[in-house]
Amino acid sequence: MSVWGRRGSYSATAFVVVFFVVLAALAYLLRPFIDEEANAELAESPSDFMRIARFQPVEWKKWSPETVALARRRDRPILIYAGTVWGEMRPKFDDLANTPEVAELMNREFVCVRADSLMQPKWRSGPLQLLRNERGDSANFALYIFAPEGRLIAAPSIGELSEMSDSGFLVFLRRTLNQYADPNPTPLHEEAVKEAFQLSGGLASEPGSASEYANRLLVYLDQDFGGFKSRTESELLPIEYEVLLDQGRVELAVESLIKLSKHPVNDALWGGYFERWSANYEHSIVFAKTAQSNAGMLSVLTRVAVMSGSPIFEQEARRQFEYMLVRFADANSSTNDFAKWKDARRSPRHSFSPRRIRGLLNPREQELAVNDLGLDVAKNPQAIPFFTKRAEVASKYAAYQTVLEKLREAVAFPEEYKGNLVSYESQATAIASLCRTARLLNDDTLKAQCTEAFELLKQRMRSGINDVIAWPGSQSTEPAGFSCYLQYAAAAWEMMLLAEDESIGRDGLAVLNRGIYLFTDEQGGITAGRREELPPEWNRVFGPEVLDLLGASAVGELIRIGNCYSTWLGASSETNAVRSAIDVAVNRSGWVIDQVPIRAGAMARAIQFVEKGVQIGVPPGADWQQLESQFPSYQFVPRYSLEKDSYAIRTYGNWSKPLAFEELRQRL
C-alpha cells in the first residue's frame, strides 16, 4: 500500500477515535439531563432505604416468598441486604453495588434482595443476632447469602466488609458461589440453627442478673463525650442509660449525659440528638436522627431531671419534648431525619463560615455564639453550633433562642433533613415518651398536648377488632409487626397513667392480646413478624428478637409492658394470654443478659422488674416526681380505689393494706 493509502487509513482511524471520544464526553456531560431507568419495585416503595437504590445497576427485588421461588427456579443463591437508610455501612455497600463488575456478577449469579429493617421486622434480628452483636456489628446493617432452601452460606461482619475493595468483594462473592455448590451445611448455618434453637427454648437456664449487666455497661461508656462506645464509633443507647437509672446510678448517668449535652451530637440548631459520632474526633458525627433514639432520650432526660433535681436537665427535657412533639408525633411524621454528609465542618448547609456568622449576628450575639455555642468567628473556617457551656446557656436561654433562630433562618433547604417513610410504630414510641414526660413534670400544658396527640394516634392507628396498622394506607400495604402492637400498648399505658382513665388501658391491653395471638408460634414463643413471611424451612435460623436493635427488643418490651398490664388487672381472663407469654419469654430468653456485653438493656430492665416481684400501687393524683426519685427500680400501676396520698405494695400477687408514703418508703 502506498504512503498515501496508509495516511488515509490513519486519518479514518483517527476520525473514528475522535468521534467516539467526543460522543463519550457529550454523554458524560449530558448524563445529569438524561432520565435514568429506575427499578420499579424500589421506586414505588415508601421506604427511604429502598428508594435510594432505585437507580443502582443491581436488579434489587423486595423480600417475599415469591423471591425465594424465583431463586429456586433459577438455581441461584439469594443475597439479602437488610438495613436502614441511616446505617453507617449503607454508603459503603451502595458504592460496591454501583461498581459495574460487582453489579454484573450479582445480577448474573444471585437473586438480590433489599429489605428495610423497619418495614419488615423479621429482618431486624434476622439470623445470628447474638453472634453479630458479639462481633460488634451494627443493628442498621446485615448482609446474608442463603440457598433457596434456607441454608445460610455467608454473613460477613461489618469489619470484614469495611476492609473490602471492589476486587475483594468480587473474590468474596465467587467464594460464596463455590460454597453454594456444596450441598453440605456451612459452619455458619449450623451456628445460626443452634442460636435460634437456644433462643426458642432449647437452652434451659435461669434469668441473668440485671445488676451484673449494668456493671458491664460501664466499660462501654464514652468517657470523653458521653454515650456508649462501639468498635469504631460512639452512639446513643438510651435504654442502657435507663438500666443505669433503674440501678440507682444517677450520678454516673448525669456525668455522662452532661458530656453528651455539650457535644455536637446534641443538635442545638434544630433540636434532637444525632445517632452516632466518631470516637476519635468530637465534630465528626453522623447526621441521622430516629424517632426511637430520640424518644428514648426524652425519657432518660426527664427521669434524670426528676431524680437529680437539676434545672439544666429539666430544660433539656422540655426542649426535647417540644422537638419530639413537632417532629415525630404528627400524623405525617417520617421516622427519621437523614443527611448524606458526615462531617459537620464540611457541610455547606448545616455549618457556618465566619463571614456568614458576622453577617447574621450583632456583636453581642456573636459573643454568645463564640463563648457558649462553639462558633469561632475568628479562625474556624466552618462551625456547627452546639452547647459548649450548658449551664450558661440554661441561665440565658431566651437570648440563645434568638441566636439559634437567626442561624436556622440562614440554613438552605431545611426540609432535606426529613425522610419520607411514615411509621405509626415510631409515632407511638414518640407519644409514649411524651406522655411519660408530661406526667413526671406534672405540667398541664404538656398533658393537654399529649392527650391530643394520643387521641389522633388512636384514630389513625387502630384498625379492625383490636388490630393496629403500621403505615398510612396510601403509603404501604406491609402488615404491622409485633413491635407495632407493643408500642401502641405502651403508649396507651402511659396515656392511662397520665389521664387516670382506665378505659384507655383496656384498649391497650386488647391490642396487646391481639398481638400475642397473631405473633405466637406453635411452641408459644413470639415472632417479630408474621410467620407466613418466611418459607417454613427458613424459620430454623430465625430466633425471637431479644436484643435492642432499632429500638427496644420485642421480647424485652413484651415482658416489661405485659407485666404492667397483668399486674394492673391481676389474674383475670383479660391477662391470661399476657401472663403466659411473659412466662415463656422469661424462661426462654432471660439468660441472654448474662451472655452479651451490650444491647440487651430492654431485656435487663424487664427481667429486673419481674424478678423483683414487687410493684407499687398508686392512687389518683399521685406525686409522680416523688415516686420516681425515691423508687426508680419499681414498676407503678394504678390503684384508683386507694384514697389520695395512700399507696400499696404488691408482692408476688398479693396487695398490702393502704400505706402512707413514709410507710411505703420504709417497707421498700
Image: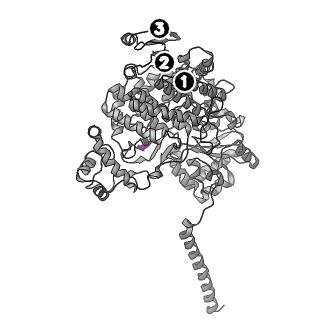
Residue contact between numbered discs 3 and 1, judged by CB atoms under 8 Å:
no
State the extent of the magenta-drawn residues as a range: 273-277
Label 1 sits on what residue type?
Gly
Q: Residues within 10 Å of mark 3 (few under 14, many from 20)?
A: few
Number of the label disc, if any, that sits on residue 656: 3
Marks 2 & 1, CB-CB < 8 Å contact = yes
Q: CA distance from mark 3 to mark 1?
A: 23 Å
Work out whether mark 3 precedes mark 1 in sequence or the reverse, and give the earlier one: 1
* 557 left or right of 376 in image: right
Q: Is residue 327 above or below residue 570?
A: below
Residue carrying label 2: 638
Residue 140 image point, x, y percent:
53, 42
Task: Please give left or right for residue 262 compared with residue 247 in the image.
Answer: left
- Secondary structure beneath disc 2? strand
Q: Which residue is mark 1?
A: 505
Q: Which amino acid type is shown beneath numbered disc 2?
A: Pro
Quick check: can you spot residue 439?
A: yes
Image color mode:
one colour
Q: Position of residue 174 (x, y in %)?
A: 64, 51
Crowd rating for badge 2 (residues with CA inside 10 Å; few <14, some 14–19, many 20+): many
Measured Cα–Cα span from mark 2 to mark 1:
10 Å
Q: Residue 585 lies in magenta, yes or no?
A: no
Above or below, 229 relative to 95: above
Q: Quadrant of residue 518?
A: top right
**In magenta stretch: residue 274:** yes
Q: Is residue 339 visible?
A: no
